[in-house]
Amino acid sequence: MLSKEDYLMIQAQLGRGVYKKDMAEELGVHPRTIRRALERGGAPVARRRRGSKVEPYKSFVDRLLKENVWNGVVILREIQARGYAGGITVLKDYIHPKRVLRPGRSTVRFETPPGRQMQNDWGEIWTRVAGRETKAHFTVNTLSYSRRFHVWAVEREDAEHTYEGVVRAFEWFGGSVEEVLVDNQKSCVVAHRVGERVQFNERFVDLGGHYGFAPRACKPSRAKTKGKDERMVGYVKGNFFQRYRSFESFEHMNRLAELWLCEEADRRMHGTVKEVVAERFERERPYLQPLPSVRFDTSYREYHVVAWDSYVEVKGNRYSVPSELCGKTVEVRITLDGRLKVIWEDEVVAEHLLRPRCEGWVTVPGHHEKLWEEAVRVERRDLSVYEEVARCS
């Protein structure tokens, strides 16, 4: 491009009769460039380069990257909330050169037919719940064919919540699968010895029988056999828990999670199968098994002896039961939402809400009617007995 000084030299040489071809050779440009400059009457004006739409948000994007937020969609949503009107392409162009700062990870994936398999796994992350830093445990259940998944967050990671997570996933998908692949967590696998059959937890086997799936376990130290689900745990951490960083409660967290599943996770273009997850799931849906009419009971189960006063002690407090069960061993079931059921001979004989000890014993008056009738017996005597005693004295 010609400069102002170049144009002044062209004018001077033109006045001396120098040919345009010779001027062009001296300046190292094409003769047409000289001609256009003379027609224009000056040197070309440099076009002002239009600023990128992401320019005002670069400092905020850099801050997210320093906080280890690398998911482009998450960053896009964050800056859109601050007024960004551009697309994701220009944002990715800005982020891409910086990705060398982030170590990569790879996993092995195994393809399965539709309706065949669901993979189960747990993850955990520190986040803010009700204004306090809290460790959230979340279970992820992923359909191996379509990659559609369900996530459910809770305060603890145990067998009952594992089973509840599987049930909720089936209800979310609208059907069950032929097999569920798990890691070797004790809630599902009791023993896994080389050369022997896997011994599964009895209740996990019951869960499989109820929903018609066969339990499957990864080989020891081979968790990447569940590559699809391992990947989804990372996706939840890197997307949902980066997009949302504080919650009013776990109930609030799960409401946001289901909204995010519908609006974000199900609509994503999957990098491996090169297909939108929700569209691929529609092809898998007909292969899912129908759900049973009765939901599997994921309650905690305990056994207690009813005391002489017709109460059972559960988690530090006492709850009444019918008095005819005094001295008998009853089954106590505690649901994950804090409801207590007392069962005798396969029938529910008492129901209570779980309460802390400071609120006092929980009593149903009808449970103790017979006990009070039989507790105190008063002997009736004729008054003449007392008169005879008085005469003798």
Image: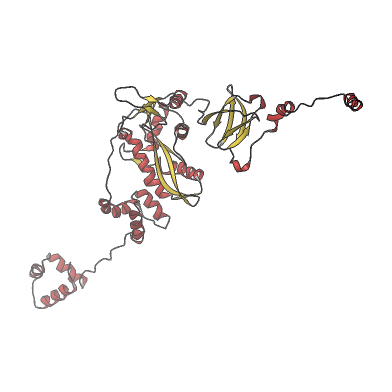
Q: Give the side of residue 127 with respect to residue 317, left or right.
A: left
Q: Is residue 178 visible?
A: no
Residue at image position (15%, 66%) is 33
**Most foreground residue, 173 or 83:** 173
The C terminus: image quadrant: top right
Place of residue 109 in the rendered image (x, y in percent of width and height, measured from the top left)? 29, 34
Residue 74 vertical position relative to residue 367 in the rendered view, above or below: below
Residue 381 lies left or right of residue 90; in this view the side is right
Which of the pair 103/48 is nearer the observer?
A: 103
Q: Residue furthest right?
A: 391
Query: Is residue 107 depicted above or below 79 in this figure?
Result: above
**Residue 206 visible in image:** yes
Q: Nearer the viewer, residue 230 or 185?
A: 185
Residue 184: name its quadrant.
top left
Q: Position of residue 97 (x, y in %)?
A: 26, 53
Q: How is the image coloured?
A: secondary structure
Q: Position of residue 13 (x, y in %)?
A: 10, 76
Q: How many marks?
A: 0
Please determine whether, in this image, residue 45 is positioned above or below residue 303: below
Can you say which quadrant of the picture contains the N terminus? Answer: bottom left
The residue that appears at 37% across and 48% down in the rendered structure is 73
* Residue 5 in the image: above or below residue 368: below
Q: What percent of the width, then of the height, locates residue 46?
A: 24, 67
Task: Tell me where residue 165 sits by quadrant.
Answer: top left
Residue drawn at the location 76% of the way across and 26% of the way down = 377
Where on the picture, by quarter, is residue 45?
A: bottom left
> Residue at the front extreme?
393
